[in-house]
Amino acid sequence: MEQGNASSTDPTPGPSAREDAVTQARRARSRVLECEDELRAWVRLSQTWEEQALAIDGSADRLPLRAVCVGVKDLIDVAGMPTRAGSSITSADPVGQDAACVARLRELGAVILGKTVTTEFGYFSPGPTRNPQALEHTPGGSSSGSAAAVGAGTVPLALGTQTAGSLTRPASYCGTAGMVLAHGSTDLRGITGLSESLDSLGLLTPSVAALRRVLRAFGGLPEQEPAPVAHALIWDGACLEQIEPPMAALIRELPDLLQRAGCRTAPLDWDDHVQTLAEDHSVVMAFEAHRTRQQELELHGSSLSPQLRELLERGRGIPSDAAGAALARRDRSREELAHHLGGDSVVVGPAAPGPAPAGLEATGSPALSRPWQLLGLPVVVVPGARTVAGLPLGAQLIGLPGQEEQLLELGEMLEPLLRALDPLPDSPAPVRKEMTC
């Protein structure tokens, strides 16, 4: 399914901005219901959508996200709705207070349309969600419902989270723009976490331009042009994962595309650090996940998915000094990368090893996000490239905290160049079942 036009899918002023919030929310909700039998992206829809929209229509305040309908990953609290975290062992009782990020979106005029599917506690056990671009292919995880909802054009904005590759991979697979906010830059109160050193908030929108507008509103960033990115270091990801032919072809196109966007390019010569960071990420994630979810393992171990239970049991066996050593290496690598990049360079590479794999039994590999997530860096996923069969491919732009505007500026320039590329060859060619809604 191709994404809709900007007026129906971008959280930006346009023809729909002249409509009242109730009309816009009703249309979005109808679109969700129309597609849900095929998409299966939503856990539940809000019963207060009309009340929210009426309050917005009655407000004279300047609301930057007036009537923008939002899907919220079901790890994130929404007042009056349960947070089940993709698990059968969590409470079905509604929570009493919004997560800080949800409260912020309401302040900006957004309508919280409902909760989207997540994997169990943000780990590997897949939910029922299907990829809107190819229904028999995974949407990725753990922000599967949020990415699928945006990729299908049912909502223009969704919240996700990332601990390993939980947002970058679904964005790439479902053909959306995405941003992982720098670790520690956002209030995570009200979010069910897995690893305190790794958990980050993320945003999903149809385009990088929309992502930039949302982030400016969400974070109160000044609307001013950043210093341009002068130098892009291209990372092919091959030291961590076998890169599939379509993604390898895209990586080969990147030097020319980035030069057309005004950047000098060179390969990233940092594989030894990248490999160590990926290994250390797995150690930290398992160690902290066990510490965070120890009670669930002890009380409900037999009810947990095999994937989550294995992670927690592995974490139980990791000594605290091993996790501490991994975090110390992370700190040294972060300092070296800051020196390496300076203020005008970023890393550009694949957001996933290839297009979304066929099948719904797994969510794909997060390997290409692990090093950057351990470092706590902001990441922007740029959509636009596609295979011959129509499967999306995303590039990730990685920078230092404080370079968010530069990443978004470069992403806005790169996205139309990716969209203009000829389709990249599939190997093997998948059978693509499209949505009918």
Image (spheres, grey):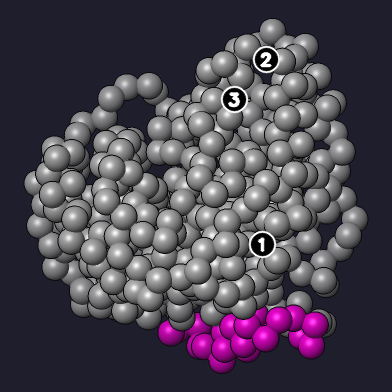
Please tell me whether residue 314 belongs to the stretch shown in magenta.
Answer: yes
Residue at the (50%, 29%) spot, across then down: 6
Quarter occupied by residue 371? bottom left
Pinpoint residue 60: horizontal percent, then vertical percent: 69, 8
Dot 1: few (<14), some (14–19), or many (≥20) neighbours within 10 Å? many
Number of the label disc, if any, that sits on residue 129 = 1
Location of mark 3 (residue): 65
Residue at the (50%, 69%) spot, across then down: 431
Location of mark 2 (residue): 19
Q: Magenta-highlighted stretch: main secondary structure?
A: helix
**Viewer can see residue 201:** no
Sequence order check: which comes first, mark 2 or mark 3?
2
**Viewer can see residue 223:** yes
User: Image height check: is 436 above or below 156?
Assistant: below
Label 1: element kind = loop
Near-viewer residue (1 or 294): 1
Residue at the (18%, 69%) spot, across then down: 270
Mark in the foreground, 3 or 1: 1
Amino acid marked by disc 2: Glu
Residue 93 horizontal side relative to residue 6, left or right: right
Pinpoint residue 306: horizontal percent, then vertical percent: 67, 86
Q: Could you tell me if the residues under marks 1 and 2 are in contact, i.e. CB atoms within 8 Å?
A: no
